[in-house]
Image (tube, rainbow, N blue to C red):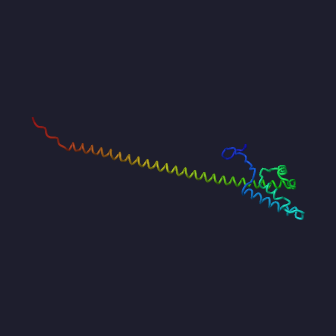
Amino acid sequence: MKHVNANGKRVLVRPRRTHRQKTHLEEARACLETWRFKTVSDRYTPGPFTACSFLPDSVLKTLASASHIQTVEQLKSEVNWLFADRHGEELLAILCELDDWEYQQRQRVKEVNAEKRRAATAARREERRLQIERERLQKRTEADRLHAKKCMAAEQVKRDREARKQAKENIKPLPKRPR
């Protein structure tokens, strides 16, 4: 793809799945059944055939599951449906819209999960930063305590020296004997 996204990356073109599965398949079947009944009631009501004969269940199942069918020619080659020329484009447009909606739903789920992962990562980083900060503060406190202890010891040594010096000065030397 030539277009660049917000992150400066070139995103791969959305790959088409060959078959719809699970809820996507159920939604496609439901859309096709709704379209079948609506089309028969709107266009062919006073007609000789029913909704099931207009779009047989076998054709409906094939169209609902096969997402690789994108053109009327592919539709004609894959399924033998009498109304492919008349209603093929309309039917494929409905399925394409459903596929796009499903893709957007998946993308939203991916974005939500990515946002959750980003938030969890940010929380972990913040917790780690706070832990490092606590360790730094603890080390700094310990270093300050040790420094204060050393300073107190140095002061004590000074006081002891002064006291010894003072004690020496207070001791009167013995008088010298006359000769």
Of all residues shown, which one is farthest toward the left? 179
Compared across the picture, whether 146 is left or right of 75 comes to: left
Determine the residue positioned at 81% across, 57% down: 58
Looking at the image, is 56 positioned above or below residue 11?
Answer: below
Residue nearer the viewer, 98 or 81: 81
Q: Looking at the rendering, in which quadrant would you find the N terminus?
A: top right
Residue at the extreme bottom: 46
Task: Please tell me in which quadrant of the rendered image residue 105 appears.
Answer: bottom right
Q: Position of residue 61 (x, y in %)?
A: 79, 56
Front one among 152 and 107: 107
Number of labels in the image equals: 0
Residue 27, placed above or below residue 148 = below
- Report the residue that reaches farthest toward the top: 179
Q: Residue at x 88, y 64 (%)?
A: 45
Q: Position of residue 157 (x, y in %)?
A: 30, 44
User: What percent of the width, then of the height, locates residue 27?
Assistant: 75, 58
Drawn side of residue 68 relative to residue 83, left or right: left
- Percent coordinates x, y for residue 13 in the rendering: 73, 46
Q: Residue at x 17, y 42 (%)?
A: 172
Q: Quadrant of residue 178?
A: top left
Q: 33 or 41, which lies in front?
A: 33
Q: Quadrant of the C terminus?
A: top left
